[in-house]
């Protein structure tokens, strides 16, 4: 169970090699020992993440997970819960893709949407069923401000995140009567492996900063949070700009 100060005893990370996901897991586990499950494809990065968490004193194991293998999601979730209830599940997998290619190449667009949206919905349904059965828990869905108003520069990615965000926002209300919480986290530009080589956007942040915002939001029982928090105000303005004005912005 999650204790009074927001510390879980067990955490599942779907996207077990995600920079942001690992930062969130490590922040939630600060000052305590947790049972951690890293769900990701086998790789040296996954091995390194397991070793790092084990060296920090956590009980950690890996399970195989491929976002595009929709038929395998049930097996992954079953294996993740095999050792008992899980307090927190972090949905942290995703791809950025080549945005210019994505709107002109069918396969690229489908890949991006299938990973970021379809797979997130698939795993969300499975997590919801498990957490309803155990009667407690929290799902942290790592969304993006890109989904609040898709821009010309990344509208395929933005569309995929908009769908993911809408699903988890609705799932939050569906699970509320069952004592299961859903926290939607909307980061801006995060400097990390996914954005390596891209110019940093205004209000860019780090995985560790996103993790701090997320952990605080979990303690405060928030439903949705922006990282950095100032983006809440910025995106409120962006959402309400007339289209004729919005299309003139260098975004």
Image (cartoon, rainbow, N blue to C red):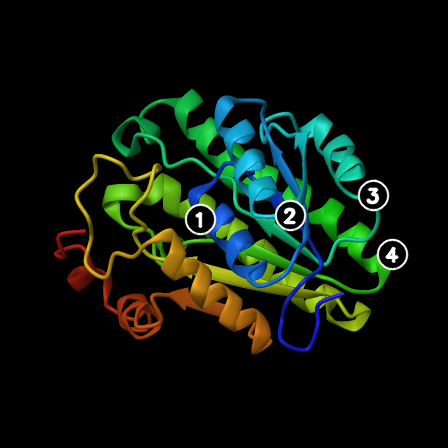
Is label 1 or label 4 in front? 1
Per the model, the C-alpha gap separating discs 3 and 4 is 15 Å
Quadrant showing the N terminus: bottom right
- Secondary structure of the residue carrying tag 1 is helix
Q: Earlier in the sequence, mark 3 or mark 2?
A: 2
Q: Give the number of the disc on residue 101.
A: none
Q: Is residue 148 visible?
A: no
Q: Which of 249/77 is in front?
A: 77
Q: Give the number of the disc on residue 58.
A: 2
* Callout 2 crowding tier (Cα within 10 Å): few <14, some 14–19, many ≥20: some
**Residue corresponding to mark 3:** 83
**Residue at 56% from the left image edge and 78% from the top image edge:** 220
**Residue corresponding to mark 1:** 20
Compared to residue 222, the image places residue 149 above or below, namely: above
Circles 2 and 1 in contact, beta carbons < 8 Å: no
- Secondary structure of the residue carrying tag 3 is loop
* Callout 3 crowding tier (Cα within 10 Å): few <14, some 14–19, many ≥20: few
């Amino acid at each position: 169970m999650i204790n009074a100060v927001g510390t879980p005893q067990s955490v599942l990370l779907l996207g077990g090699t995600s920079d942001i996901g690992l930062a969130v897991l490590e922040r939630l586990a600060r000052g305590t020992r947790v049972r951690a499950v890293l769900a990701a494809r086998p790789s040296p990065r996954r091995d390194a993440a397991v070793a790092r968490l084990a060296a920090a004193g956590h009980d950690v194991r890996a399970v195989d997970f491929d976002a595009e293998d929709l038929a395998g999601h049930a097996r992954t979730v079953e294996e993740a819960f095999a050792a008992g209830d899980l307090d927190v599940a972090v949905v942290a997998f995703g791809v950025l893709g080549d945005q210019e290619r994505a709107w002109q190449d069918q396969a690229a667009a489908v890949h991006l949407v299938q990973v970021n949206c379809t797979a997130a919905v698939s795993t969300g349904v499975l997590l919801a069923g498990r957490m309803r059965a155990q009667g407690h828990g929290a799902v942290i869905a790592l969304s993006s401000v890109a989904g609040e108003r898709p821009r010309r520069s990344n509208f395929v990615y933005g569309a995929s995140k908009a769908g993911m965000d809408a699903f988890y926002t609705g799932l939050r209300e569906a699970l509320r009567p069952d004592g299961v919480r859903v926290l939607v986290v909307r980061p801006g530009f995060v400097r990390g492996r996914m954005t390596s080589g891209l110019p940093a956007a205004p209000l860019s942040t780090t995985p560790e900063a996103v993790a701090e915002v997320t952990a605080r939001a979990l303690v405060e029982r928030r439903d949705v949070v922006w990282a950095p928090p100032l983006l809440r105000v910025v995106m409120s303005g962006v959402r309400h700009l007339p289209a004729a004005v919005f299309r003139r912005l260098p975004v």
